[in-house]
Image: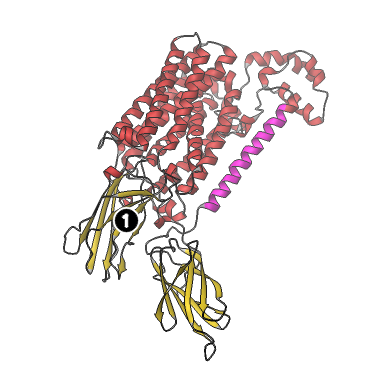
Amino acid sequence: MPRATVGLRRALAAAAVAVGLVVLTGPAAIAHADVDRSDPPNGRRLEVAPTQVSVTLTEPVEPDRTRVRVVDDAGRDVPVGPVRVAAVDPARIDGPVTVTVPLRETLRTGSYHVAWRTVSSSDMHSTYGTFTFGVGTTVAASAEVSSAAGGVRLPAETLLRWGVFTGLAGLLGASCVALLAGRRDGGTAAVDRLLRLGARSGAGAVAAAALLEAVLVAGAPSAAWTSDFGRVWAVVLVLLLVAALTARRAARTVTGRSRSVGLALAAAAAACTASGFVGHAAAVRGAGWVTAVTAAHLLSTALWTGTVLALVVLGAGRRPVLRAVTAVAGPAAAVSLASGLLLAGVLVPSVGAATGSDYGRVLVLKLLLVAGAVVLGAANSGVLGALRRRWGRGRAQGGGTPGARFATAEAVVLLGVLALAGVLGSSGPPTAVRWAPTPTSVADGAPVTQSLDDLLVGVSATPNVPGQNFVTVDVRNTRRPAPGPVTAVVVAVGGAAAAPAREQGDGTWLLPTDALARSGPVDVAVRVVRGGLPDASGRWRWTVAAAPGTEQGGRSTRPLVVLGLVVVLGTAAAAGRGSLRRRRALGVVGRHHLPTTTTTTTTTTKGPPRERALRSRLLVRPDLPVGLDDLALGAGGREAAADPGEVARHEPVRAQRGA
């Protein structure tokens, strides 16, 4: 049996073991629709009984499968009206939603417990939670805010997601490399092997995708065509089926093979892109671009993994297509790294979320595996040339070529990356407000005071946490007697419209408002109206405190993401410039296009010294790496030893140079 085939089987076996360990020991597969806030807030004491209760979730949910229950301190159910689900931003139907139920009776003094349960439209995961509030009495906040704090493990879903990702990767990589190999060598046994791999991978992806949908909609089969997830996933299934059937046709017949392979590649890429439109990334508040980044991340990662798998399948037959495959896999790896960092910054907003949540810890492990794949790619593509040449001297003793060994190792690591992607797809990201970065600004406590003409005006807000607040304006006249009475005080909080405050007596004016929805600084504009005198206007900066139990994530991950993007994009730019400069200097695409006539000797003596040096080096040592693959963005590598036939063709040139 060929050594590459044995290596691939060992790789798949190791990947299967890794997937099993991830599935059995990974974090709980929990719902993605997490709590953003509730109204009344959890643990809040109210002096006025509310007429409705609501909870805002980070993703859209299924209204027909949403339930809300309100229980008083005697254990009696409070009558509630029908559930209403409304988008926080009407322009974004895929964004956060607010679930509201009206109360059909006036609440008496006491404590109340609200329990809710729903199903996310983005991924069909069930989620539930509780919160408490008191009317005229103090209550403790509910400990179980959301089921995102822990849930039932779903190993089947994680395994099926890994099957979909791996099947897509195999189909994409096999189709891409088969096209490149077919153009260079025509119909060969290597191309047939690749097409068979693509057909089997496509069939596996279709089966895994169909089973995944069956698992997710098991509780409500109608969700397969009524939910957002069901409609998008139906498109993914159709595209996967087209890709699998065309790949199977290409594997069985030579007639129209290039057209069939191209169609399979396009359909698989479209399916991979469409799958980015479901899940938690598609519903991040105010960040529609995250959907596009997710699609690019899935496509580039699958292409990178698939091309490496295809190179392992080719074994010794991969040498003719190495450079062409490198030109595809290298940029794909760069896009995968850059888009992955962007998504990490959005879905894991703080260092505390990265280290304190299951999702964050799995994501960190995934990033470490990706870094390992990059290092192995560097070894494959010749950066560690000295090590490879040293190993090459021992091949006669049966050690195997280092390129094949590193390519297999890189494939195993990338399969592990896909396994962790399956875990992340089955888990809820820490996007709720409790994981937000800790505010750096200090909340105001005492009233903020400033002078307006002959008035001393103080502004404060209570209870000064996100949600409903009372803005208090205290107006004192510094002149005695006062030149005119204060007849009205108009207050505008943040971007809300100005509204008149109610007089409370003794120069105090009160305005209830919901405009303090977020922690941090907010502008408060005040206009004091006095009879017979010009209005006195001013603007205050008031800082709202974070609600208890929220915004405890610590430092933001944005600086780390920016640093990572600079490193990745800088390395990719350097790789592109270096490859282009070397190719222009050589005047060739690769070593397979080197001229073999004696005219080459004359041409190498012309041009700048750097060009002559590059040409001479390649003629004397055609096995040395040149091009984009030298910088090892995970392309799968190039062999360290030169092709014996090519060395023979260049022997006359070497002899002439030696003379």
Q: Secondary structure at mark 1?
A: strand
Which residue does the image show at 36% across and 31% down from the upper left? 16
Answer above or below: position of 59 versus 611: below
The residue range painted magenta reads 558-583
Q: Amino acid at mark 1?
A: Ser
Occupied quadrant, residue 586: top right
Coordinates of residue 544 in the picture (x, y in percent): 45, 67
Dominant SS of magenta comes to helix
Answer above or below: position of 510 versus 244: below
**Residue 357 visible in image:** yes
Which residue does the image show at 42% across and 25% down from the upper left? 239
Coordinates of residue 396 in the picture (x, y in percent): 54, 20
Occupied quadrant, residue 385: top right
Answer above or below: position of 394 versus 182: below
* Residue matched to label 1: 54
Residue 581 among magenta residues:
yes
Q: Nearer the viewer, residue 53 or 413?
A: 53
Q: Nearer the viewer, residue 656 or 160?
A: 160
